[in-house]
Amino acid sequence: MSRGAEVTSSNLANVLTEGYAPRSLELGVHSAISGVSVLGVHRSVDQGLLGDRRLATAETAFAQAQAKFTASLDTEIGASGDQASLAGRAAAFEASLVAAASRPDQSTRLDAAADAAQHIANKFNSISDRIQTLRSTADLEISQAVKTINTGLQKMQAMNEKIVAAQARGQSAVGLMDQRQVLVDQLSEYLPLRQVPRDNGATSLFTVGGVTLLDGRAAQFEFSNTQVIAPHMTLENGLLSGLSVNGAQIIPSGARSPISDGKLSGLFSVRDHLSVTAQSRVDALARNLVERFQSPTLDSTRPPGSAGLFTDDGAVFDPMNEVGLSARLSLSVAVDKAEGGQPQRLRDGLNAIAFGPSGNAVLLQQLQSTVSDVTALTSSDLPPVERSFSGHLANLSSVMGQERLTSDQTLSFARANESELIGQEKEMGVDSDAEMQNLLVIEQLYAANARMIQTLDDMMQTLLRI
């Protein structure tokens, strides 16, 4: 009864303890005398439910990494109706050209058009910078995740050894098993894993894709953090680190990855897929803008092959060097007031030798028509549909908004699934009502035994008096 009271009290005291599994006594018939003996303490765990909950945790962490990226980038690009968005900046530029063409003699309107053009270039730069910041953050988090995984697996190996040693000495190891369960739960956030029992209380860990994490000895993950990431740096061209396990390279994300799902795979997906796709889309739009104003039929003052109103860091755009164009996009120094340029060149020509008639609006009208002309994007995964420049930007905002909605819905579903499994797991945990009833029964048994002992003592005293 004392052992039963100890187990019941432990269950009640650890109702809210993470990783604690309900205990119960394993009883058996004593071989020498009539009665019941305690064979050990049983730790009650539903391994199937526990495994499903861990996979749900990994799925939630994966979805959260992707949702965080799409939300941040969608906010940076902005909604079409927002004046500070990329589409809003383009609409403001087009409107400023219309206003300038209506009164080409007013320098304030020409200044406003030049400022609006500069704002578009700045917004492209800002979006590209944001993408690279998100990539760098993901890369750093990957490095931290790898350290956490390696530390957790080493602790798991040590815990296995302690449990095996305790059972070999005939001691209870249920407390150590609780601690081991907490370690596995922590690892399940980063990797989709399965736990397989081994002899003498040890356990092994494998990813769902078949990577051995722990089977006697802990696996060693390897990754090299990159401090600064530029648009052209990718895993495919070898400028970013991949992931290896025990010296063997593995695919870190995607359908063919053995660690797909989980925070680690989600971070690789952000760094190597989502951000690269986003960069290519923004670069394609920057290219469309540059090529519109780099057309040789626009602005007769420009020499053949020279840069237009928007440049590749001051130079002519080379179609073979599109990657990262949005980060290098800049306004022509001819009209950039910060570089000593003159906004009047929007009216008279970028390379005009002298100012022309103040009422001449021909070039301004051509510039406005260039923005509104329908053309198709020549690169990226966006649909090759002919649109105006504002139409392409509105489409990008729509695509990003839809991807954000989809990722949010995926995360919401994953969280709901995880929450349901956590609830089921808690139902399998310590039942405080039942444990209190057990404690009352034990108390009654103690009282009954005490009365029986008292009765026997009274009988012995009576016999002695006789």
Image (cartoon, helix red, strand yellow):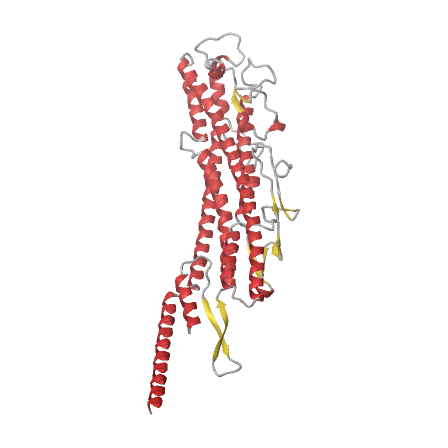
Q: Residue most toward the bottom?
A: 466
State whether residue 135 appears in this view: yes
- Left or right: residue 367 versus residue 432 is right
Picture quarter with the C terminus: bottom left
Does the image show residue 382? Answer: no
Residue in the image at 56% along x and 41% along y:
273
Residue name at image x 60 percent, y 63 percent = 198
Count of numbered labels shown in the rendering: 0
**Depicted 239 relative to depicted 94: above or below:** below
Residue 175 position, x and y percent, is 49, 61
Indicate whether 212 appears above or below 367. below
| Residue 219, percent from left and from top | 62, 51
Q: 345 or 230: which is nearer to us?
A: 230
Drawn side of residue 39 relative to residue 322, left or right = left
Q: In the image shown, does 21 or 230 lie closer to the viewer? A: 21
Quadrant in the picture for the N terminus: bottom left
**In the displayed structure, does residue 101 sit left or right of residue 275?**
left
**455 vs 85: above or below:** below
Name the residue at the right extreme.
248
Query: Residue lying farthest front?
Result: 465
Q: Is residue 241 above or below residue 313?
A: below
- Percent across and percent down for residue 309 are 52, 20
Horizontal and vertical percent position of residue 407: 48, 45
Q: Nearer the viewer, residue 271 or 438?
A: 438
